Image: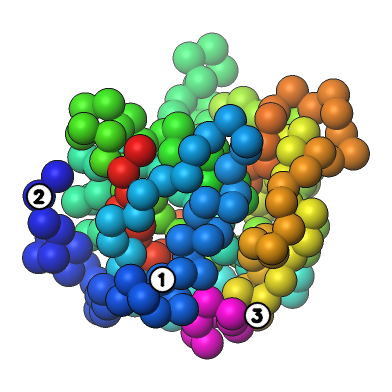
Amino acid sequence: MKDMGEDITIGDEEVIVLSRNGNEFLHVERYLNQSHSDGYRNYEVKDIFRIKRRGETERFKSFQSSNSTSKSRLLWHGSPVTSYGGILSHGLRFAPVRDPQSGDLLCRGIHFADMSCVSTEHCHSDSTGGEALLLLCEVEVGESPLEMFSSSLKTGNVTNKSNKYSTFIRGRTGPTQWIDAADIHESLIGIEMPDPTCDPSDTSYPYAPSNYNKYICYNESQIQIRYLVRIQF
């Protein structure tokens, strides 16, 4: 994968390359490697960029202020490398699809995870020599997202009808403790993240069909990209 220095400035107000020896880099790296199952080996982190996309903070704050039950979490998102030109230019987006039977518009949503191994599965790194890009995003999930055990194309419609703006798919394994992400950087104060000093463990839902927790959002304004992480499998 070629050097990304110029490419990632597209649509971005601020791009800061983190020092490998700095606490911010080490905290993000720790979250990455502490939030996967025992069956995964640690990822080699090539680069971490702190990202601020133009206009995204204002849009995010406007969404938060319009909702009385606010709770944001620092979560992972994975996409193929070929998608990042569009993501960094326009942010994370989704396109509704039409139900072939009813004709209704169905919302796929944008998917996130509190375990990095979930998001790396969406990177399709086989075509890039094992290198991949992950996003670490602030996601407004709300105080009480709609909790389900599986998802489909109709999940977004069900969530909207329940007057919720995100869906939580509970898995069998997940974080045991949550802390304030201000430990990574002061700009992240008030955002929840899994405590990296505590290993993920079994949840109280051993029969959940999903191995790990997943979060689905249906409004692009719920998302603020915070970090871009370049890794090697």
Numbered disc 3: secondary structure: loop
Q: In the image, what residue type sits under mark 1? A: Phe
The boundaries of the magenta stretch are 182-189
For the point 69% across and 28% down, the residue is 210
Front tag of 3 and 2: 2
For the point 33% across and 30% down, the residue is 124
Whether label 2 touches label 1, CB < 8 Å: no
Residue under circle 1? 25
Q: Which mark is residue 6?
A: none
Who is closer to the viewer here, 79 or 147? 79
Marks 3/1: CA–CA distance: 19 Å
Marks 3/2: CA–CA distance: 35 Å
Any part of residue 179 in sight: yes
Residue under circle 3? 190
Numbered disc 2: secondary structure: loop
Q: Which of marks 3 and 2 is nearer the N terminus?
A: 2
Q: In this view, does 103 lie to the left or right of 49?
A: right
Indicate the quadrant where residue 181 lies: bottom right
Numbered disc 1: secondary structure: helix
- Where 134 falls versus 55 (above or below)? above
Q: In the image, what residue type sits under mark 3? A: Gly
Residue under circle 2? 2
- Where 136 falls versus 77 (above or below)? below
Could you tell me which quadrant the C terminus lies in?
Answer: top left
For the point 11% across and 56% down, the residue is 3
- How many residues crowd mark 3 within 10 Å: few (<14), some (14–19), many (20+)? some
